[in-house]
Structure formats: C-alpha cells, structure tokens
C-alpha cells in the first residue's frame, strides 16, 4: 500500500484541484479524501507537491525494432517515467515497420515488461509506402489503438479515403504527418528569414497547410476521427478550428518545442533545432498557444525523436530532424503555458493526460476510488536543470535550461517506476 499525504490533487477528469490524501492498494486507488490512515502503507509526503493522473504521450518514437542504437523500448519507457508519463503511443516507423501482427506483438510484449503502458500504433500503409493499406482489422483486433504513417505524408487521396472509411468502421483514429514534399525546398527549417540567412531552402507553411486542408475536409466527409500531428503553422491551426466548427471529428497535437521556440532557435542550436515540421515564426508559436487555449488543439505530445550524437553532429542539410522530448515536456508546458497565464495547471493536465486518452478510445486516468493507480507527483514551480537523460539520446535544444515542474515520483499500476 502507498499513502500519498497532503498533495494538491489536480485531476482534469473530475475538475478537482484541492489538497487531499490518496491511498493506493495493489494497482488501484482505493480511497481519496482527508486524514486517511493506513497502518501498513508506505507514506509519501506530498505537501507542496502536485498529484495528477499519470501523463500520456500520444506520439513517441522508441526506435525498436531496428534502430535501437538511438533508443529502445526499455530506455524510452525509462525516459517516459522520468518525465511523469505512465502511458505512451509509439509510432510505426520502425525497421521493420509496424504493419504486421508479428512486429506489433514484439513491441507489445517488450512494452509490458517496462513498468509503464506502452501502446503501439500500426501503420496505415504497408512499409509506409503509401500504396497499399495494411490489414487494419487484424491489427485493430491485436490491440493497435490507431493508425499512422507518421514521418511520411499519404499523397494518394483514393487510398486515404479508403483508410478513413475503414478506420471509422473500426471505431479507431488516424493520425497524419502533414508535409507535401513537392512544396518543400528542404525539410527541417522554416522557409523564411532564417533559412535565407543560412542559405537553406526550407519548408514553407504551404507544405503543411494544403495537406491539413485536404485531410480536414476528407475527415468531414467520411466522419473519420483524425489527428493533425505536431501542428506548426498558424494557417493550419485556423483550418482545424474551421473544420471543427463544420462538425469534423478533427483533433490536433502541439509539441513543447513548437509552442516554446521559433526558427530563430536554429541559429543558436543548429541541428538540435531541426524539426519536421519545422519551428516557425513567432506568429505561428502564438497561434499554437491560442489553439491550445480555445481547444482547437487538444493534445500536447513530444514527438520524442531520439538520435545519436554522431547523427546530430552532421551538417544541417544531412542531420536527422527531431529532438528527445519526454523528460522536458512537463517543464516546458509549465514554463511556456502555465506560468505566462495561457493555461491553468488543470487545463495543461487535460492536454497531457485526459485528451490523448480520449482520442485513443481509452478511459482517461483519474484520481478517484477504483481507478488504476497511475500518477505523477511533481513540484509545479521547483526549478531543475536539464543535463542528464534516462533516454539513450540527448539531442535537445533545452540542454542547460532551467525548467519548473520537477518530477518526484511516477507511479504506474500502483508501483513506483520513477523516484527523484
């Protein structure tokens, strides 16, 4: 038994934000309230700390199978636990691709041994080639929570329409990477003043906007549940807002790097700030924040993309895109959204736990009796320095930053899986 005493319980499912005790027995929460006594329990004094449902990251790359020099399921899960996450959804662009039952079950079985909940999305198209649909029904039956070709846009509209209709029939969501390669001179950096200064072609907003417009309208016409992944363009935010008003079942994700940094970061951090889609301008960053404030964007995800130091040391044009994000996500959410007054802590927790769970058709974590004991305990305003990582990778522009939101405990299924 674990007894958490005097914590500030912040639960976006019930709307709770008050000081209380939480008693865990086995894998479940058995009591909440004040002055709970339990003689045999391990006591955690959470005075001055926030107790929230375990965070959920609906967009991570654990690189396993096939690219485990960057990350593997164990180290990815350890990074997640250190960041306060009890549930993650892995993307399908591994080697081999998760387009078959064998690879899906490999990740699921390995994930079960990590101490957190590791879910594995399936690809939409075989080998991510955009030419033939996977056996969506078989993969859904085997436990895939949704489908995505993340990393590669699906250009064939006829195939996409089939995927949307099938996903709707199965009652599962689709998530899309929205960048039209025909409209990009070079990926990873926004096409604007910074790319001009660097003599680097860049990726314009249009590459994202045209894909988002298309997929929002196809979602409207098919009734499919669709997520616009790692949204980066101010125009795309407006397109999602409009599609939602029209009745489309469209959702969007934002990453901490897109609501914290602009393309100016590429001048300072080099390849550590190379992303797909890229960091854009201040007006885009502010539009993403407005989208989070009004619910246009409902999920905060990391797009945790670990790479080796050698890969990120390459020149800008040949280095891979992406950053490791699980261990800095909560801190950046508090620093960039809560402390400036854009979101309350309760609203941030909704974006980081309740909303991703609901999108993936799961019962969201909540701090109530008979709920699974998946919790994070953190100090909202206590600063900590970004220096070492549980991830195999340290490719982050935030190394050396001081962030709020120090995580003290992550508890999953009633077990402490991380302790500071």
Image (tube, helix red, strand yellow):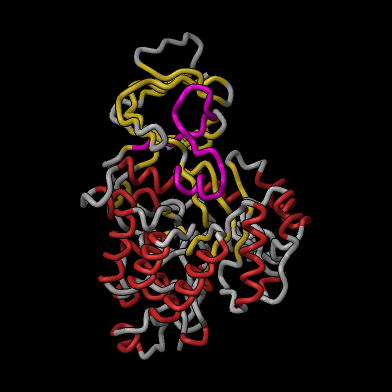
Query: Outermost residue, right direction?
Result: 102
Identify the image quadrant of residue 132: bottom right
- Provide residue 128's location: percent of width, then percent of height: 66, 71
Which span is picked out in magenta?
353-378
Residue at 53% of width from left, 18% of height from top?
1
- Quick check: is 247 in the magenta stretch? no
Q: Quadrant of residue 300?
A: bottom left
Is 258 placed above or below 184 here? Answer: above
Residue reaching furthest to the bottom? 199
Q: Looking at the figure, which quarter contains the C terminus?
A: top left
Q: Is residue 54 above or below residue 173?
A: above
Q: Residue at x 44, y 29 (%)?
A: 367
- For the image, the number of numbered tags is 0
- Residue 376 inside the magenta-drawn segment: yes
x, y (%) of residue 278?
Answer: 41, 74
Give residue 22's quadrant in the image.
Answer: top left
User: 353 or 237, which lies in front?
Assistant: 237
Viewer can see residue 80: no
Between residues 123 and 412, which one lies in front from this camera angle? 123
Q: Which is more toward the observer, 219 or 41?
A: 219
Look at 31% across and 57% down and name the residue there.
401
């Amino acid at each position: 038994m674990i007894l958490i005493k005097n914590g500030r319980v912040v639960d976006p499912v019930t709307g709770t934000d008050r000081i209380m005790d939480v008693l865990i027995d086995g894998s479940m929460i058995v009591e909440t309230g004040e002055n709970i006594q339990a003689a045999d329990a391990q006591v955690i004094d959470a005075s001055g700390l926030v107790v929230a449902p375990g965070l959920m990251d609906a967009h991570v790359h654990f690189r396993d199978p096939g690219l485990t020099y960057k990350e593997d399921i164990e180290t990815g899960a350890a990074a997640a636990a250190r960041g306060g996450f009890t549930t993650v959804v892995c993307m399908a662009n591994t080697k081999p691709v998760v387009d078959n039952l064998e690879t899906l079950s490999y990740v699921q079985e390995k994930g079960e041994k990590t101490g957190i909940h590791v879910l594995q999305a399936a690809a939409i198209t075989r080998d991510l080639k955009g030419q033939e649909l996977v056996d969506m029904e078989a993969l859904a039956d085997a436990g895939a929570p949704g489908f995505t070709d993340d990393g590669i846009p699906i250009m064939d509209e006829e195939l996409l329409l089939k995927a949307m209709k099938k996903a709707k029939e199965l009652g599962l969501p689709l998530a899309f990477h929205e960048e039209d390669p025909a409209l990009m001179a070079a990926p990873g950096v926004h096409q604007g003043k910074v790319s001009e200064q660097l003599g680097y072609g860049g990726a314009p907003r249009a590459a994202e906007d045209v894909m988002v417009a298309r997929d929002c309208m196809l979602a409207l016409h098919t009734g499919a549940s669709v997520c616009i992944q790692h949204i980066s363009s101010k125009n795309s935010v407006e397109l999602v807002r409009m599609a939602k008003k029209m009745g489309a079942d469209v959702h969007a994700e934002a990453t901490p790097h897109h609501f914290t940094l602009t393309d100016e970061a590429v001048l300072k951090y080099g390849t550590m700030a190379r992303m797909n889609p890229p960091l854009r301008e201040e007006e885009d960053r502010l539009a993403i924040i407005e989208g989070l404030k009004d619910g246009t964007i409902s999920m905060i995800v990391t797009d945790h993309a670990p790479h080796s130091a050698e890969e990120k040391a390459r020149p800008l044009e040949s280095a891979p895109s992406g950053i490791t994000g699980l261990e800095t996500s909560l801190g950046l959410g508090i620093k960039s959204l809560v402390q400036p007054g854009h979101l309350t802590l309760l609203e941030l927790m909704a974006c980081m736990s309740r909303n991703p769970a609901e999108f993936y058709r799961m019962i969201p974590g909540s701090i109530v009796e008979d709920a699974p004991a998946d919790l994070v305990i953190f100090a909202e305003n206590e600063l900590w320095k970004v220096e070492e990582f549980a991830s195999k990778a340290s490719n982050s522009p935030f190394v050396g930053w001081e962030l709020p939101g120090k995580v003290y405990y992550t508890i999953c299924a009633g077990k402490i899986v991380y302790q500071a």
